[in-house]
Amino acid sequence: MIPTREQAWVLLTEHTQNANLLKHALGVEAAMRAYARQFDADEELWGVVGLLHDLDYEKHPSLEEHPFVGVDIMRAEGYSEEIVNAVLGHADHTGVARESQMARALYAVDELVGFVVAVALVRPAKSITELPIKSVTKKFKDKAFCRAIDRDHLRAGAADLGVEMRDHVETVAGSLAAIADELELA
């Protein structure tokens, strides 16, 4: 089964109450939808995958549990293996290969969404709509900024997706700007 966006939101909010995790899910959903449009793919499916990728993270953040608990929940709901495999593939430690373009997109956008939001939050306006791409690329080079985000992971994600890093940043930042009000970054 492929859930509707509404069904996915209900499932997500049953398992996630943290406002920042919900905003992250919305951001990844927006980026996935942008790439679905770019690759002429199923925008609803890609959006649902983005929305649900961290379904279990609030309650099960350990490498032993995340995203395994989440995909068990999705399987119990009857969600398609296409969704499950993409979610499993977004985390290197699962060992699941990213065989679909959707899975590669999820891997590529997940950490970058967090990075772009972090850059917006340290800017004076704290707005994603006023975020120059140059600011993101400058912070990308600053290893002390968001040091938990592996720059090689971000580069590899873009390369595997077949997009230039600057174009990737523009796509993700643009998708986040489109939902700036929902992210409270207008």
Image: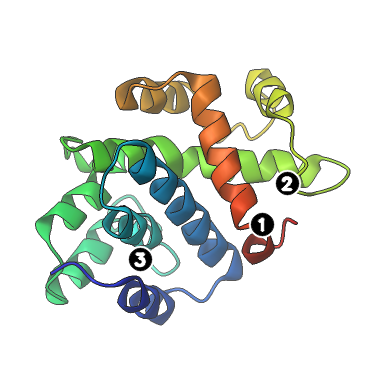
Name the residue rendered at 46%, 51% in the picture. 28
Can you tell which quarter of the image residue 70 is in? bottom left
Q: CA distance from mark 2 to mark 1?
A: 7 Å
Name the N-terminal-most of marks 2 and 1. Answer: 2
Q: Nearer the viewer, mark 1 or mark 3?
A: 1
Can you tell which quarter of the image residue 158 is in? top left
Task: Kindly identify which residue carries mark 2.
Answer: 129
- Tag 1 secondary structure: helix
Task: Kindly identify which residue carries mark 3.
Answer: 56
Of residues 56 and 181, the one drawn nearer to the viewer in this rendering: 181
Disc 2 residue type (three-letter) = Thr
Of residues 19 and 45, the one drawn nearer to the viewer in this rendering: 45
Q: Position of residue 140 (x, y in %)?
A: 63, 24
The image shows residue 119, relative to residue 144, as above or below, that is below
Disc 3 residue type (three-letter) = Asp
Name the N-terminal-most of marks 2 and 3. Answer: 3
The image shows residue 56, relative to residue 119, as above or below, that is below
- The colouring scheme, among rainbow, by chain, secondary structure or one colour, is rainbow
